[in-house]
Image: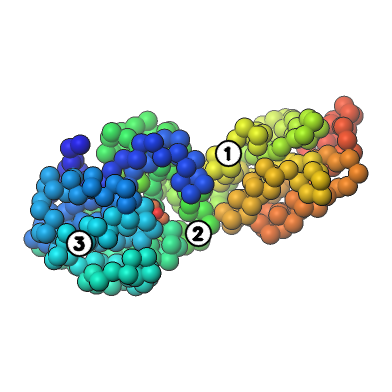
């Protein structure tokens, strides 16, 4: 496949992973890419690498532009192996290269690969001259790991942002030329599933990024932002601050339909009050898709019947996933049905407490809700929202 020049002397040498469908538990229905960038200057520089199984493809793409031994710097913005897996094999062929990375990056490389590579640790405010161009570094710890940093080239006005602003999206395009709603939905899903727990750190990153003159944001997953930079910056700011829409997410699993009936009764209350809502039966929906809608929802409503001495495993899995990601306070409603033990709401309340979700109401019906009970639930929710 042809190596693409994204700006004069700057090449996209990463790879598309068209068929990956599960990225550590996150469903990637549109595949992904591991982007790497090659800058031809007096000092030839590679920014990030790819997953180990794509090492040869990366080498082939670089070789279309320059001999590997001519590379002077490898910038490692992030050690997670989707960006560093190729490093051990690649570095054997780069006898003259110095790895530019954060302090945590050096430590993590050593823990991963036990390398004998030459490192140069950089920190916020440091810059390295490549000749005509300069690289400036901004530490972005916890977006996504402690080692994360972004690299800015002021002469080209390009921000090499690694995970930040990424999307799990394989494409034959380099730039944001796919329909914006598709790209933005994948960027939102990426934020919800990867970045959301570190939103407070993102607030600081956004303050710094907004000071930069940017014409291109080149992430390490998905498409390069060129035509829609204000839109992605605006959305990152919204998501980082936990701003919500007038929206509810209703999530449940049901054994014989009672919990589902209550879910619809709750839905009716939100619908009557003109809320946007999403309605997810966990038998048919994946947690990584549902969490995307939780990101900008005001209310999260979760339902399960009592099953044995606990709740439905699907609901427990969702609540576990939610607990690991949610940081901003949301309002919540719990619901379900039971036969002889109200374990369901007790268990779910513990998850809500640990997630910091404010429980505004709960409904637990013995066996099967009749029409009067369902109408009472709709009225009860309506009175609280
Ligand atoms: Fe794309 Fe945190 O790695």
* Mark sitting earlier along the chain (3/2): 3
Measure the alpha-carbon separation of dots 3 and 1. 41 Å
Q: Does any portion of residue 220 appear in the rendered image?
A: no
Q: Residue 348 location, x and y as percent?
A: 75, 50
In the rendered structure, are the residues bearing label 3 and label 1 in contact, judged by CB atoms less than 8 Å apart? no
In the figure, residue 260 lies in which quadrant?
A: top right
**Is label 3's Cβ within 8 Å of ligand 1?**
no
Vertical placement of 118 versus 301: above or below?
below
In the rendered structure, are the residues bearing label 3 and label 2 in contact, judged by CB atoms less than 8 Å apart? no
Vertical placement of 22 versus 145: above or below?
above
Vertical placement of 32 versus 158: above or below?
above
Q: What is the tally of numbered marks visible in this picture?
A: 3
Q: Residue at x 20, y 67 (%)?
A: 98
> What scheme was used to colour the molecule?
rainbow
* Mark sitting earlier along the chain (3/1): 3
Q: Nearer the viewer, residue 92 or 192?
A: 92
Residue, disc 1: 286
User: In screen coordinates, is 347 left or right of 108?
Assistant: right
View quadrant of ligand 1: bottom left
Q: Residue 323 location, x and y as percent?
A: 63, 54
What number is the disc on residue 92? 3
User: In screen coordinates, is 7 left or right of 85?
Assistant: left
Q: Residues within 10 Å of mark 2 (few under 14, many from 20)?
A: some
What number is the disc on residue 198? 2
* Mark sitting earlier along the chain (1/2): 2
Q: Residue at x 14, y 65 (%)?
A: 95
In the figure, residue 351 lies in which quadrant?
A: bottom right
In the rendered structure, are the residues bearing label 1 and label 2 in contact, judged by CB atoms less than 8 Å apart? no
Q: Quadrant of the N terminus?
A: top left
Q: Residue at x 85, y 30 (%)?
A: 375
């Amino acid at each position: 496949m042809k190596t693409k020049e994204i700006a004069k002397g700057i090449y996209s040498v990463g790879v598309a992973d068209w068929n990956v469908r599960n990225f550590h538990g996150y469903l990637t229905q549109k595949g992904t890419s591991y982007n790497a960038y090659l800058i031809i200057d007096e000092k030839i520089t590679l920014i990030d690498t790819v997953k180990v199984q794509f090492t040869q493809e990366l080498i082939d793409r670089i070789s279309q532009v320059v001999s590997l031994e001519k590379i002077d710097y490898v910038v490692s913005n992030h050690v997670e192996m989707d960006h560093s897996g190729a490093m051990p094999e690649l570095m054997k062929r780069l006898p003259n290269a110095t790895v530019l990375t954060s302090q945590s990056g050096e430590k993590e490389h050593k823990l991963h690969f036990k390398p004998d590579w030459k490192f140069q640790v950089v920190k916020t405010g440091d810059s390295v001259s490549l000749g005509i161009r300069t690289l400036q570094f901004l530490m972005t710890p916890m977006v996504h790991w402690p080692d994360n940093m972004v690299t800015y080239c002021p002469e080209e006005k390009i921000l090499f942002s690694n995970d930040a602003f990424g999307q799990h999206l394989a494409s034959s395009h380099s730039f944001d030329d796919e329909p914006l709603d598709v790209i933005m939905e994948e960027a939102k899903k990426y934020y919800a599933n990867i970045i959301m727990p570190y939103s407070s750190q993102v607030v600081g990153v956004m303050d710094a990024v907004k000071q930069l003159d940017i014409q291109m944001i080149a992430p390490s997953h998905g498409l390069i932002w060129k035509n829609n930079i204000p839109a992605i910056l605006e959305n990152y700011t919204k998501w980082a601050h936990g701003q919500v829409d007038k929206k509810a997410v209703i999530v449940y699993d049901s054994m014989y339909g009672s919990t589902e009936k209550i879910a619809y009764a709750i839905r009716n209350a939100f619908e009557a009050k003109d809320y946007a809502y999403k309605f997810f039966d966990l038998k048919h929906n994946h947690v990584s898709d549902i969490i995307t809608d939780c990101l900008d929802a005001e209310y999260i409503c979760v339902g399960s019947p009592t099953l044995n001495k606990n709740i439905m495993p699907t609901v427990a899995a969702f609540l576990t996933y939610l607990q690991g990601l949610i940081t901003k306070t949301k309002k919540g409603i719990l619901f379900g049905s039971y036969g002889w033990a109200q374990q369901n709401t007790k268990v779910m309340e513990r998850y809500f407490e640990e997630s910091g979700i404010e429980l505004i109401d709960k409904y637990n019906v013995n066996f099967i809700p009749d029409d009067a009970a369902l109408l009472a639930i709709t009225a009860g929710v309506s009175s609280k929202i």
